[in-house]
Amino acid sequence: MSTLSVIVPAYNEADTIRRCLDHLITQTRHVDEIIVIDNSSTDTTAAIVDEFAEHNDNVRRIVEPRPGVIPARNCGFDSATSDIIAKTDADSFVREDWAERIVTFFDSEEGQAYDGLTGVVLTWDGPSRVLQRRLVTLTLGELADGGKIGGLSGPNYAIRQVAWKQVRDSLRSDPDIWEELDLSLALSDWDLMMYFDPRVQVDTSCRQLRHSPWQNRSYIAGGVRTAARRGDDAAVKVLRVDRPFRFLGFTVMWLLFRPWDDEKHNWRPHRLLMPLERRRALVTCERRADDR
């Protein structure tokens, strides 16, 4: 059976890293190696990870002083010792059978043909995950039961270590690109196939989606930048067509997620019109009032 390493880049993630690691160490299939890449955090992230490492032999922390998810990812993937390397984010919580499904797929007869695996990403701090799952299922089309796919999803993917070593030197280091798209295009350049399994699921935070589409405009354009810098003209054309639809999607998600309070489980339109910091302060006051 293949071994599995999980890489978790983290910068000042004290609010979520404990829960992230709790999910990783309580998997139905033991994770052989959990590597948290501490991107020089200034909060208590390091102390929390070190506490886990003290009580779990498969957890370790590595400091990567170069800022950004790409240096952190590269440091983690280069340090991994397992046959399969998976990545999730410090604000993301993998499902209890995540590791088992990853290893089982790569060790299966069908999985032998693939070098990458990805799955569904929902939000844990957004409205109704049941509804989210239904909406995602409606958009999957032919992928509803799984199948070959052209790209990986940032907080929820895994690749074979041999594939990582094969594409490593061709990856970009620009801080304003989509790291998972860059990796996906590199795998495709080497004719290495990726698979989508809807049962491989991760719940991530919707915090980025609480920023307006205008504030996210640079990120939304990151796909075109990534493909252009790789010199992939075909991907650039596809992503240019996709960009206005992605902007529309961000608009819809902003309207849905920004007014939502996950702890109170309510949606208040007035939160949408407030600056984000003021919205956070108001939500805090509302929670304190409920506690009295």
Image (tube, rainbow, N blue to C red):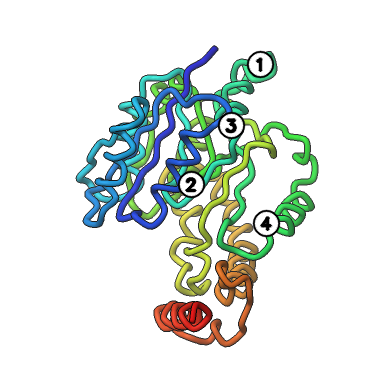
- Among the two numbered marks 3 and 4 on one chain, the one whose residue lies closer to the N terminus: 3
Whether residue 191 is visible to the viewer of this picture, yes or no, is no
The tag on residue 83 is none
Q: Amino acid at mark 1?
A: Ser
Give the distance between the C-alpha atoms of the residues marked 1 and 2, in whole angstroms. 32 Å
Per the image, label 1 sits on a secondary structure element best described as loop
Q: Residue at x 46, y 79 (%)?
A: 288
**Relative horizontal placement of residue 65, taking residue 163 as reference (left or right):** left
Is residue 86 positioned above or below 243 on the image? above
- Among the two numbered marks 2 and 4 on one chain, the one whose residue lies closer to the N terminus: 4
- Among the two numbered marks 1 and 2 on one chain, the one whose residue lies closer to the N terminus: 1
In the rendered structure, are the residues bearing label 1 and label 3 in contact, judged by CB atoms less than 8 Å apart?
no
Is residue 32 positioned above or below 279 on the image? above
Q: Which residue is mark 3?
A: 117
Per the image, label 3 sits on a secondary structure element best described as strand
**Relative horizontal placement of residue 75, taking residue 260 as reference (left or right):** left
Q: Which residue is mark 1?
A: 108
Q: Amino acid at mark 3?
A: Leu
Q: Residue at x 25, y 36 (%)?
A: 62
Q: Amino acid at mark 2?
A: Ala
The tag on residue 227 is 2
In the rendered structure, are the residues bearing label 3 and label 4 in contact, judged by CB atoms less than 8 Å apart?
no
* Residue 228: percent from left, percent from top: 45, 49
Q: Residue at x 37, y 26 (%)?
A: 58
Looking at the rendered image, the disc whose residue lies closer to the viewer, 1 or 4, is 4
Looking at the rendered image, the disc whose residue lies closer to the viewer, 3 or 2, is 3
* Residue 56: percent from left, percent from top: 36, 29
Looking at the rendered image, the disc whose residue lies closer to the viewer, 3 or 4, is 4
The tag on residue 129 is 4
Give the distance between the C-alpha atoms of the residues marked 3 and 4, in whole angstroms. 22 Å
